[in-house]
């Protein structure tokens, strides 16, 4: 799905940028601005920022939940 119409960024582009930024470990701070930088783009109108932020948050929560499940399964 296209998340940013000005730069034609898709959900896949956003999530790949989160992974590249080190968001997988849950320790890195990943912002919408960093997502744009990883995609060699700049925000234009800003309408997409809240949606990108939500995608980042959801992805980080899913990663955290998956890690918790792994930890519980090892006990």
Image (cartoon, helix red, strand yellow):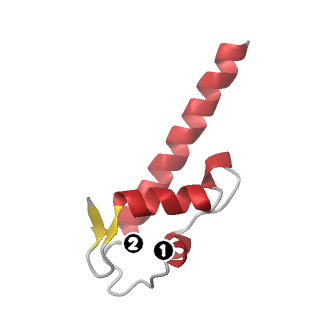
Residue that protrudes farthest toward the top in the picture = 75
Image mark for residue 49? 2
From the viewer's side, name the closer residue of 19 and 47: 19
Real-space Cα separation, disc 2 to disc 1, in angstroms = 14 Å
**Closer mark to the observer between disc 2 and disc 1:** 1
Q: Secondary structure at mark 1?
A: loop
Q: From the viewer's perspective, is residue 73 above or below residue 65?
A: above
- What kind of element bears circle 2? helix
Q: Residue at x 30, y 77 (%)?
A: 47
Q: Which mark is residue 39?
A: 1
Q: Residue at x 62, y 62 (%)?
A: 21
- Residue 50 at x, y percent in the picture: 38, 67
Pick whichever of labels 2 and 1 is earlier in the sequence. 1
Residue drawn at x 26%, y 58% as measured from the top left:
1
Residue 45 picture quarter: bottom left
The image quarter in which residue 11 lies? bottom left
Identify the mark at residue 27; answer none if there is no mark.
none
């Amino acid at each position: 799905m296209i998340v940013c119409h000005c730069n034609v960024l898709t959900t896949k582009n956003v999530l790949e940028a989160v992974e590249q930024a080190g968001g997988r470990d849950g320790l890195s701070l990943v912002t919408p601005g960093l997502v744009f930088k990883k995609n060699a783009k700049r925000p234009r109108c800003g309408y997409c920022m809240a949606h990108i932020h939500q995608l980042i948050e959801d992805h980080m929560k899913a990663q955290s939940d998956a890690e918790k499940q792994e930890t519980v399964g090892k006990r």
